[in-house]
Structures are given as C-alpha cells and as structure tokens.
Image (cartoon, rainbow, N blue to C red):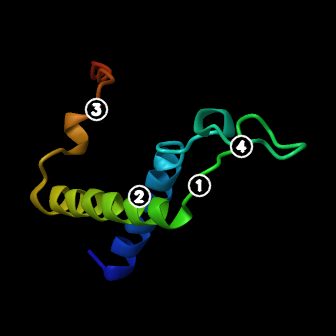
Amino acid sequence: MQITSILAIYFLFWVMSAFIILPFGVRTADEAGVEKVPGQADSAPVNFRPGRVALRASVIAAVLTALFIANFTYGWITVADIDFLPKPPASAG
C-alpha cells in the first residue's frame, strides 16, 4: 500500500473520529453554573478545547488506520465475509 493511500485513510479516520468525539466532555453554561452572555444559545459550550479534541482524534485515527492496514495485509475480514446479499441462481440453458 502506498504512503499516500495510508495518509488518505488516516485523514478520513481523523475527520470521522473528530466528529464523533466532539460532544464528549463539553458542558453548557447551565451545567457549569456559569452566567450566560446575552444572546448566547442554551446549548453553547463553556469549556470547548479544540486541542484536546484534535489529540484524541489523532490517537483514535492512528489506531483505526493501523487496524485497517493490518486487515488489508493479513485479510482478516474480506469482501466475501461482509457480502450479505444472496447470489442469484445460475440460469439454465
């Protein structure tokens, strides 16, 4: 597998991981007991830390990329393993 393919797979896993991790550990003003700024949305985060989200997404993406490459190399799960649709019968004649 080429390094550009590995980087593209890592980037896709990173974006997916970042969006999945985004809501974890974030508290609203009501939950934190902080006064809201006039016009602030009720759901606006008080303690958003983009560096922490990026670090967590990087670690998770690295693990998922390593698992993907290992599966690509050793063939643990193949296309035949996830093909759930029945095959049509061969036509006679």
**Identity, as a three-letter code, of the amino acid under mark 3:** Asp
Residue at disc 4, secondary structure: loop
Q: Nearer the viewer, mark 4 or mark 2?
A: 4
Q: Between marks 4 and 1, how big is the CA–CA gap?
A: 9 Å
Identify the image quadrant of residue 78.
Answer: top left
Q: Which residue is mark 3?
A: 83
Question: Which of disc 2 and disc 3 is earlier in sequence?
Answer: 2
Q: Which residue is mark 1?
A: 48
**Identity, as a three-letter code, of the amino acid under mark 1:** Phe
Q: Which residue is mark 4?
A: 44
Q: Where residue 18 appears, x then y in whole percent?
A: 49, 55
Q: Where residue 58 appears, x then y in whole percent?
A: 38, 66
Q: Which residue is mark 2?
A: 13
Instruction: Check the image and report above or below for 40 versus 51.
Output: above
Dots 2 and 1: beta carbons under 8 Å? no
Tell me if 49 is positioned left or right of 75 in this view: right
Residue at disc 1, secondary structure: loop
